[in-house]
Image: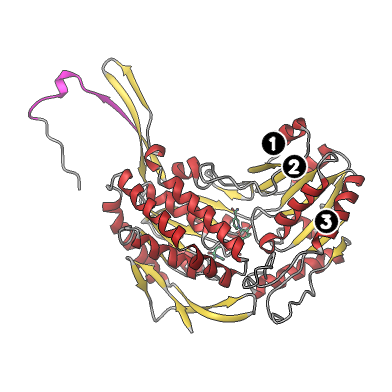
Amino acid sequence: MKKISHFIDGKAYSDEKSRIGPIFNPAIGEQIAEVELANKTTVEKAIDSSAKAFLKWSKTTPINRARILSKYKDLLINNMEELSVMVSMEHGKTIADAKGSIQRGIEVVEFATGITNSLKGDHSSSVGTNVDSHTLRQPLGVCAGITPFNFPAMVPMWMYPVAIACGNTFVLKPSEKDPSCPIRLAELAIEAGLPEGVLNVVNGDKEAVDTLLENKKVQAISFVGSTPIAEYVYHTGTKNNKRVQALGGAKNHMVIMPDADVNKTTDAIIGSAFGSAGERCMAISVAVCVGKQTKEKIKTKLLEETAKLNVGPYTDEKSDFGPLNNKAHFEKVIGYIDSGEKEGAKLLTDGRNFKKQGYENGYFVGPTIFDDVKPEMKIYKEEIFGPVLSMMTAETYEEALNLVNDHELGNGAAVFTKSGNIAKHFTENAKIGMIGVNVPIPVPVAYHSFGGWKRSLFGDHSMHGPEGVRFYTKLKTATVTWSEDNIGPEFTIPVLS
Ligand code: NAD
């Protein structure tokens, strides 16, 4: 059986003493490979390799770092087919979804190729007589990234391209559920000319994460995953004096005003609630209709369109979405549907007994819609992370906004309306990190920054864009005078080690 190990110092690294984890093809529910789960020694080897590489890489000029990233971008584009199959086979999403997500990652690489501009400092002349002041942004050292199963290519690419463009070196610990693509991403980086050790990948679980959180050589941790683990990573990492950005789970609401276009809004709900089987941190999982009539109109159209969805494996081009990623997650999502039914929500479509012919053991859940969901229900309070939509009715816009603001998670939210006033009010007053106005999945482009509020992000910085550059650099301010007394032939520049 195919075995996936680690990527350290520019080549595959395997440790026979490692524990092993299974990798499944979720469409057929069968194990297709196994992955080494790194022990402390393996993770330390990767950290040491990155610490050594930092000495040279941090002194490489930003333009030369950018040139390598530019070659890397071309290689990623040229290898899109292979990468997308790797993602789909181990994650379960359709090829179109996999390609879309890799494209989003490539855009971050593209942003990172402009690092010379992002690293420019400020300059103030004559802060005193003959005195100038300027700022520098300098790299931190070894940075680490810990990523979730739902975007095995894109989420790692939110992190390391920016980190290494800024002059850091990076140890990536991707999800142990779909590790093939992250290893391939690192191989391509070496092919593009990235020096050995600048990007290392260790596969593993809690033992690997804890080693990264505790090791003194690691300066910063970027994490994306569920809220409880994000909170754990944030507290443990900061206790160990590291800079940490930890992005957690989501419960994204769409507020639908009475003036919203029914067809466009319904299309938006279908794509954002069920696309990628709802395994997206920006998925819409709650549709809040303002007024009973709005709800009835949306509901009728939604049921009509949901019935047309094709659920199936990535190998079938007609599939709109695929299975859930793994059996434990499949059972968790089924458990949430059971719980919603028990708590009295009205099940309009039930995806629990969905079976795809020829794929009976796959982890498929059909599109599921609950109506009359109440704020105290578990299916409302918690993230489900499956193709399950909750519908709610609010009497007024204010009531809908309060629902959004009272939820403990604050990743994304959208408002669908023709009213500029409502759109502006929602944008300014929703306690949410990423807002969509008539846009269901408002994922910021690479040169803006991605991140939520409340218990969807622990730490001070979002990812990529300007916030990513701030996270991966330390600010230094120099105050300089060159009066005549300071300049002389005997002046020598000290050699720094
Ligand atoms: P997860 O929290 O289970 O795992 C994320 C990472 O943490 C993995 O690399 C995993 O190996 C590691 N991990 C798991 N348990 C750990 C433990 N006890 N101690 C230390 N490390 C541990 O998340 P997941 O199930 O892989 O991914 C789904 C979650 O990710 C969802 O909650 C989703 O909303 C979230 N997510 C958030 C964003 C965002 O931008 N906010 C983006 C994508 C996914």
Q: Residue at x 45, y 63 (%)?
A: 79
Residue 121 in the image: x percent, y percent?
37, 33
Mark 2 and mark 3 lie on one chain; the one further toward the N terminus is 3
Q: Quadrant of residue 197?
A: bottom left
Q: Is residue 258 left or right of residue 48?
A: right
Type of amino acid under label 2: Val
State how many labels appear: 3
Q: Amino acid at mark 1?
A: Thr
Q: Residue at x 68, y 55 (%)?
A: 283
| Snapshot quadrant of residue 27 | bottom right
Ligand 1 has an atom within 8 Å of the beta carbon of the residue at disc 2: no
71 in relation to 200, above or below: above
Contact flag, marks 1 and 3 (Cβ < 8 Å): no
Write the start and end of the magenta stretch as one range: 477-490
Q: Which residue is mark 1?
A: 427
Q: Residue furthest bottom?
A: 1
Q: Residue at x 30, y 58 (%)?
A: 195
Give the structural element (helix, strand or loop) at label 3.
helix
Which numbered tag is attached to residue 340? Answer: none
For the residue labelled by badge 2, is the local secondary structure a helix, a strand or a loop? Answer: strand
Q: Is residue 478 magenta?
A: yes
Establish if 406 lies above or below 126. below
| Mark 3: amino acid | Leu
Give percent across and percent down for residue 458. 57, 49
Do callouts 2 and 1 mark residues in contact (Cβ within 8 Å)? yes
- The dot on residue 302 is 3
Using residue 129 as the reference point, say whether residue 283 is left or right of it: right
Q: In the displayed structure, would residue 493 be above or below residue 483?
A: below
Task: State how far apart marks 2 and 3 are (Cα).
Answer: 17 Å
For label 2, the residue is: 415
